[in-house]
Amino acid sequence: MEFAELVKQRYSVRGYQSTPVEEEKLNQVLEAARLAPTAVNRQPFQLIVVHTEGREADMQRIYHREWFLSAPLVICACAVRAEGWTRADGKDYTDVDVAIVVDHLTLAAADLGLGTCWVGSFDRDAVIDVLKLPAEAEPLVILPIGYAADPPRPKERKPLAELVRYKHW
């Protein structure tokens, strides 16, 4: 798919088919994440892939939405701040790096016909417990992934004129 079309087609899926995600497609999505650029190439992230079948109670603890349980896979993107890069003024770029990784992941998934939904409003303590995260791993994004069962919705975005400025503010 052409990139411009891919960006238009990708949406937040909130309903998934029970069809499993093929291992080859999962590996392609994970490879796209691995290749994402990060500050100073530190790659301060870890991705945890969870096959959800039989783990519905755990998934419900993580995020309390019925549609979330329909995804055959969930990927947790974790920041590892000790491995990240910090700018001279103290700005930690780890969150930016993880966001780039997740964006690569979501676009790769869409290109392969898979749906995703960027979830940030999850129960952090439940994620740490269920996924047995070590202290140095901070869960930033939970990403259900699978074949979409819900139809795409029209994208409502501000016009460019409200978002872009030239020469100065």
Image (cartoon, rainbow, N blue to C red):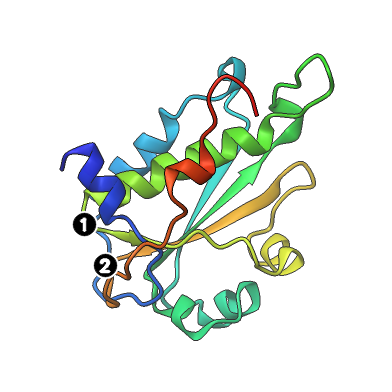
Q: Is residue 133 left or right of residue 55?
A: right
Question: In the rendered picture of this protein, how many numbered marks are placed on residues?
Answer: 2
Q: Residue furthest right?
A: 90
Please tell me which residue is depicted at 39% across the width and 79% down the height of the picture.
70
x, y percent for residue 129: 72, 65
Q: Residue furthest bottom?
A: 66
Q: Secondary structure at mark 2?
A: loop
The amino acid at mark 2 is Tyr
The image shows residue 74, relative to residue 162, as above or below, that is below
* Camera-side residue of 137 and 68: 68
Please tell me which residue is depicted at 69% across the width and 29% down the height of the picture.
93
Quarter that holds the C terminus:
top right
Q: Secondary structure at mark 1?
A: loop
Q: Is residue 7 visible?
A: yes
Please tell me which residue is depicted at 24% across the width and 72% down the height of the picture.
19
Residue occupied by mark 1: 113
Crowd rating for badge 2 (residues with CA inside 10 Å; few <14, some 14–19, many 20+): many
Do the CB atoms of the residues marked 1 and 2 lie less than 8 Å apart? yes
Question: Which labelled disc corresponds to residue 147?
Answer: 2
